[in-house]
Image: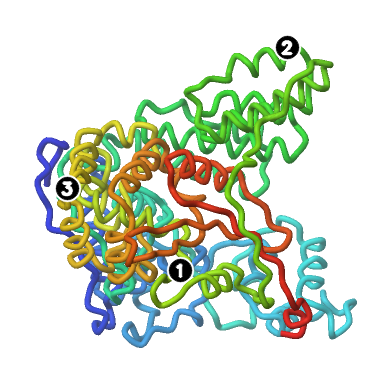
Amino acid sequence: MPTSSTDLFQLDTPKGADLDDPRYYLRNFHTLTDWVETYHGDLLLDSERKRLAALRDLPEEARCLLVRMVMRSGELFRQSKLNYLEIGDIATPLQLLEQQGWVELDPAIDVVHFCALVTRPELSAAFKDELAPLPASAKKANQIALLADLYGDELKPFSQWWPESQDLLARLTDDDLLSRLRLMFFGNLSQDWSTFVLTELGHHRYESVAFSPESRAFASRDEVDHYLQMHALRDLLDCAENPADIYHALPTRPENSWLQSRYSRLLFQIAREAERAGDSEFAAELYAQSQHREALIRRFRVLEKLTPTEATLAVLREQMDDQLRPEVQEALERIEHRLARKLGEKKSASRKTDNLPRMDLSLPASGYVEGAVAEHLGSESAPCLHVENSLINGLFALLCWDVLYAPLPGAFFHPFHAAPADLNRPDFVERRRALFEERLAGLTSDEYKILIRQNLADKWGITNRFVHWGLLTADVVELALECIPAADLKVCFRRLLEDIPAHRSGLPDLVQFFPAERRYRLIEVKGPGDRLQDHQRRWLDFCLAKGMDVSVCYVTWSDLADLSDA
């Protein structure tokens, strides 16, 4: 067992168990625990390792039952609801799990939790006398409200709430360790056991990545604890707890840059809840502490309403910088304009794009406006396709596939990544600058076409956040390679790299190819009442400035009655 990160070694990529095995989920569970013990063993306590060893010594039926419970939602389970053919009778497995402390049998619960575990008829039978004042047709919610008033926070075992029942209640008691294992494997708590199953079913395939000691999600146990603390506080926020209480319970700001981004996101979420609760001053204070992408905008939107003063305007202008992302700069300019107007300053309004080529179409009514325009404009010799963001993003991924999956420290923590873990971090591109430049340099010759075609063949179907395989077919790729100049691809890819989270969306809806002329055009479609969004306008302005054939198509319906009759 390795005891430090330097003792770790290359591991085979774990795979999902054969789904023909009725106990496939247990194999997947042990795959996960084996990976964590080998790859993150130095982050486990001796007591945790002993606990896992003792678990392995249990009969397989008991281990299967535990994993089945872990895979289900919640921590309370009625024995009568735990029916699994591959396990059989669960009485003995439950007792064995209780002896090792994995479950507690017949735990004390309040009446509200009891109500959640039983059906309405069962509830009526268990509390026949107490519910007598209610009509027989009363809804379960009304029954629960009455019982909650009667019993308040009183705790009793399930067997005492309903003595006539022959059922037994079990509670998972060590979900913390199991959550810790899942976190250390996936690097997050949003992925779960279903990831194995979806992979084995073929619904998801993932790129193989070489793992190294530096690839680990966590370098120390403190970092794992830090994540778990923040996750628990996020759960409390979802339960409508006081935002100020959650803020004061925050751990110290982590040094790990990956955890810092999660910390900033939690700060932002707390601030949003404080803002919604009407505590604007507190919200503005938290926004100022957060490095979240939207924090600066939200801070000044709050301050604009709270204190539209010269001081606020001065602070806003201090924050405005040419280095800000365009969408942030534009949002701050709008706030600046409103504040200046309130304070009596004369300031010209933010510039709006008004020089975009425009076409107007009146078409038969349709619920799919992009499809209607594509069908109207397209022909066999000039196909028009609804691709939106998928074309440029997909071609970028096919060109830069090996760069996206470069095994840099902190990029990949486990075998089930649809994108590098640091994709949305500010230093994502800079860490790979030389690799991206090498790929973009290939656009000066036909080398890039060979690489894109090869990756299309080799990587087809592999889950990748940039690629929509249903739209990025071989025919579409060939049309794009023949009709879109390499120079246009290069400038689009460079813009994408300027701010991947912001620039992955907003591209024009349609592309029309003219193979005989080896050219193309991009068309943004706007149906009745629709208007350009800021991120769409920025892409259109960019394309126009680079000399691309781009336009906005405004559609009206020639027969609205057809749509209303549909």
Q: Position of residue 127 (x, y in %)?
A: 76, 77
Image location (x, y in percent) of residue 563: 73, 79
In front: label 3 or label 2: 3
Left or right for 126, reference 456: right
User: Above or below — where is 23 with respect to 350?
Assistant: below
Instruction: State the separation of the CA atoms marked 1 and 3.
Output: 27 Å
Residue type of the residue flagged with mark 3 = Ser
The residue nearer to you, when weighing 247 against 455, is 455
| 3D distance between C-alphas at marks 1 and 2 | 53 Å
Closer to viewer: mark 1 or mark 2:
1
Q: Which numbered disc covers residue 384?
A: 1
Q: Which residue appears at 31% of the width and 65% of the height?
A: 479
Disc number at residue 445?
Answer: 3
Q: Is residue 422 visible?
A: no
Pick whichever of labels 3 and 2 is earlier in the sequence. 2
Please tell me whether mark 2 sits on a helix, a strand or a loop. helix
> Where does label 2 land, which residue?
311
User: Residue pushed farthest front?
Assistant: 517
Q: How many numbered circles does the render carry?
A: 3
Nearer-the-camera pick, 226 or 149: 226
Q: Residues within 10 Å of mark 3 (few under 14, many from 20)?
A: few
Q: Is residue 498 above or below residue 156?
A: above
| Amino acid type, callout 1 | Cys
Residue 70, picture quadrant: bottom left
